[in-house]
Amino acid sequence: MAVQSKIDLEIFQLVFEVITKSENADTMANQLTQVLVGALGIKGATIFVLNPELEELEILASSGLSINYVNKGPVLVDKSIKLSSNREPVIISDVTTSDRLQYPDKAKEEDIRAIVSLPITLHGKIVGALRLYRSQVWDISEQDVEHLQVVAQNIGVALMYFRLANAVLSVKETVNEVHSVWL
Amino acid sequence: MDKQKVLVPYNFTNYDEKALDFVIRRFAEDKGVEVTFFNAYTPVPKIELRNSLIMEKISSNLAYLQQKIHEHETGIKQAREKLIQKGFSSNRVHYIFRALNKDVAQDIVDLVLDNGFDIVILNRNPGKITRFFTGSVSNKVMKSLKQVDVYVVT
């Protein structure tokens, strides 16, 4: 029997409302994880950005997870979910039967039973990840995975916007500090 | 002499712990100093859609948020307790825990200006790249405050 899809147009509307109305990346990422948790009825959600030098995923925002789990330690790109490329969605429907987790004991303590991880890419490069956590086994539909990939792609675009906006603001502040006598 | 008021924005990371240790080393013996911890959580978005069923569903599924808020408040109380155990009297350590108004940096600046804090203790992870997207809280706070001592623990 086909698995029923959960993500519909209303959820997309919500997600894009959050992305387009947020005035900063912090609020956008936090509210996006809140909306995903609430709309999908899952345990938690986290948005990571990639630190390419350390090959670690840094948490930008997280909802539904405990402080202890969020601070569990560095999340390494290759080891966090062991996939050669990290470029495809990773679906761990049942963590108790998977050997792909970096912190399996911590997941168990946190009552996490399933994880869906989606790469956030920009210009073909990985810039982060969107991860969703559920307390039950999760047979997610292919359509929902595709929809979540669209969400992840849009997070990538929004992150690029905030990155550029911060750079422009920084330049503006620097220019404003220059007294007219020097111009 | 008026007491010196110290604000410590606190967000439960390892660097916040380092800032906490700094506060203990620097101010535990100084009875003329009052410390206030500050943490702000992001409120749930208020979005109006034509069909409000989805928002109702979200609200009912967001009961966990109350739990998370409670966990954070407990965490900030634990930080306060740590100071008390290290020699601060309880009337010298306070905390402010509330929903975010604007952004973290602006909320810190507003709090300092509205409540007359003399010192702010921030922390900074130098290798962190999320600040490229969110902007650096410590930079924004330092640029916005005058006549206030700002310490940055790294």
Image (cartoon, helix red, strand yellow):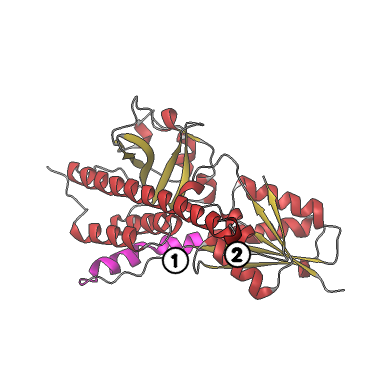
Measured from the top left, where is residue A102 in percent x and y?
A: 45, 32
Q: Name the residue rendered at 35%, 27% in the picture.
A: A83
- The amino acid marked with disc number 1 is Pro
Left or right of A151? Residue B7 is: right
> Which label is found at residue B43?
1
Measured from the top left, where is residue A158 in percent x and y?
A: 35, 51
Q: Chain of mark 2?
A: B
Q: Residues within 10 Å of mark 2 (few under 14, many from 20)?
A: many
Query: Depth check: B133 or A63 in front?
Result: B133
Residue A48: quarter of image: top left
Residue B5: quarter of image: bottom right
Q: Name the residue rendered at 28%, 65% in the picture.
A: B57
Residues at discs 2 and 1 in contact (Cβ within 8 Å): no
Left or right of A68? Residue B44 is: left
- Tell me the distance, in whole angstroms, between the alpha carbons under discs 2 and 1: 17 Å
Residue position for label 2:
B108
> Which label is found at residue A49?
none
Q: Chain of mark 1?
A: B
Left or right of B96? Residue B119 is: right
N-term mark: 2 or 1: 1
Magenta region, main secondary structure: helix
Write the start and end of the magenta stretch as one range.
B50-70
Left or right of B14? Residue B81 is: right
